[in-house]
Image: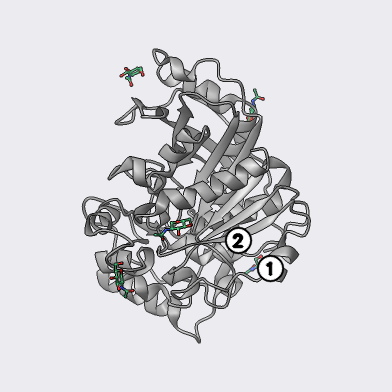
Amino acid sequence: MASLLLLAAAIIFRKASASPIDSFSRAHGDCTQFNIPVVATAPSAIYDIPRVNNDIEAAAWTIHSGTWSIPEGPQLIIRNTTTFGTFNIHVQLCVPKSTSKNTLQIATHGVHYDSRYWDPELVREKQSYVEASLKAGYTILTYDRLGTGQSDIPNAYDVVQAPLELEILRQLTLLARNGTLYNLASKVNSSSAAFHSLPKPNKVTHIGHSFGSFITSAFIARYPDLTEGAIITGFILSKYLGMVGTTAFSPLFGGVSPYNRPSGYIVCSKTGIQNIFFGGNLTTAYSTAMLDYGNAIKQPFAVGELASAFNIIGLPGPGLKAPVQYVLAEFDFYICAGDCKGLADPKVLAATYPNAKEIEVVIQPNTGHAFTLHNNATAGYQLTFDFLAKHGL
Ligand SMILES: *[C@@H]1O[C@H](CO)[C@@H](O)[C@H](O)[C@H]1NC(C)=O
Ligand SMILES: *[C@@H]1O[C@H](CO)[C@@H](O)[C@H](O)[C@H]1NC(C)=O
Ligand SMILES: *[C@@H]1O[C@H](CO)[C@@H](O)[C@H](O)[C@H]1NC(C)=O
Ligand SMILES: *[C@@H]1O[C@H](CO)[C@@H](O)[C@H](O)[C@H]1NC(C)=O
Ligand SMILES: *[C@@H]1O[C@H](CO)[C@@H](O)[C@H](O)[C@H]1NC(C)=O
């Protein structure tokens, strides 16, 4: 598993296909959405995991994954394989109206959501990380991970797996770094001046949330020269990681409307969304409207990505020189069994990224796992922008 061979990879481009919103103006910037056909090759495997085709099988899957005597990780591999394919990845690129920076952030969302996690529409000014980034002068790329949102929805067992998702992030980063991403954006809507002749980014930083932080952590460990800084939100390695188990998802099969996913996609019930994503004082931390919204934009996930996650969790990154900030929600149930205070071990972090310029850990008070869906979100974002600015990003 350590030898994550990324055999060959190539990217082809074509004019993006239509999406519901091609271009829209924001208070602090302009955004455009398009699809990128990413050609990627990654190691994969056939896992011995239960099939999920209805709600009963969805619940049985969580019981299976929580049963202590059933093996996990590499022991579930029936056969090692290689996945090669072209995967349409739906992206949103937003550029600030005015800025003195030329830093691009690439944001990778977690399980149970798509890229809207970063850009909730409920009260954008108070919640959207995208909006806050534009206001702070950052260009930001968000994308629907494979198997979510408007990206391709391939086989949930054998294709949607963590090493392939890591490779997709690498490909998107390469495109961004060499200017191709901006060039592509300029062609989506040629009447929008905002994306014309953007100089390629001087600096690229990466931010993840939850499973997106597993991917981002692995990315900076494996490809340290492709990032200038990383923000890891909603993830820290400790004995409490995932301890509450996937039964907390209160899972349903994602095969029904509006999701209509194939076999192996699971969606949280509303109770599961509250269990995993919300936390803090019921009067002050979040509103009922936020919980309703968080439930309305939820997405099914593919069981293969959890079965294969062991490939990318906890990879050492001795080559990383860039700074890393960990942002933990004080009352994160899934990651910290409900309380993240005191769980970040500086020795463990320093051993993971021994040459990082700085490793900072901050705790966002009175907040659950979904930072963007809590009242005090923007104050937390400011801690990240301050950290980036301190490092010239
Ligand atoms: C799959 O590959 C891993 C890593 O190379 C190896 O340890 C494992 O034994 C292989 N599993 C099977 C079933 O071939
Ligand atoms: C940019 O990088 C992508 C991905 O590696 C590559 O396919 C493409 O040819 C590069 N384009 C330029 C202009 O360098
Ligand atoms: C293209 O961009 C312009 C300017 O932002 C906008 O008014 C127009 O609606 C966009 N057209 C499409 C098809 O998105
Ligand atoms: C929640 O916050 C309210 C308003 O500040 C306060 O009155 C209440 O005591 C808090 N509840 C708990 C359980 O801390
Ligand atoms: C809001 O978040 C900021 C940044 O973490 C923190 O300093 C502040 O105490 C928080 N406010 C409340 C009311 O929790």
Q: Does residue 29 lie above or below 211 as drawn?
A: above
Among the two numbered marks 1 and 2 on one chain, the one whose residue lies closer to the N terminus: 1
Q: Does residue 68 lie above or below 43 as drawn?
A: below
Q: Position of residue 335 (x, y in %)?
A: 49, 69
Quadrant for the C terminus in the image: top right
In front here: 279 or 56? 279
Q: Residues within 10 Å of mark 1 (few under 14, many from 20)?
A: few
Q: Secondary structure at mark 1?
A: helix
Instruction: Give amino acid for label 1.
Output: Pro
* Rendered image quadrant of residue 277: bottom left
Asked whether residue 39 is in view, the answer is yes
Q: Find out whether the residues at labels 1 and 2 contact each other: C-beta distance under 8 Å.
A: yes
Q: Position of residue 196 (x, y in %)?
A: 50, 15
Instruction: Give amino acid for label 2.
Output: Val
Q: Position of residue 41 (x, y in %)?
A: 60, 45
Ligand 2 image-quadrant field: top right
As measured in the structure, the alpha-carbon distance from the residue carrying label 1 to the one carrying label 2 is 9 Å
* Rendered image quadrant of residue 278: bottom left
**Of the numbered discs in the image, which one, if any, rests on residue 282?**
none
Instruction: Name the residue rendered at 48%, 28% in the picture.
Output: 95
In front here: 224 or 25? 25
Which residue was labeled with disc 2? 361
In front here: 386 or 273? 386
Which residue was labeled with disc 1? 346
Q: Residues within 10 Å of mark 2 (few under 14, many from 20)?
A: some
Q: Is residue 379 shown left or right of residue 218?
A: left
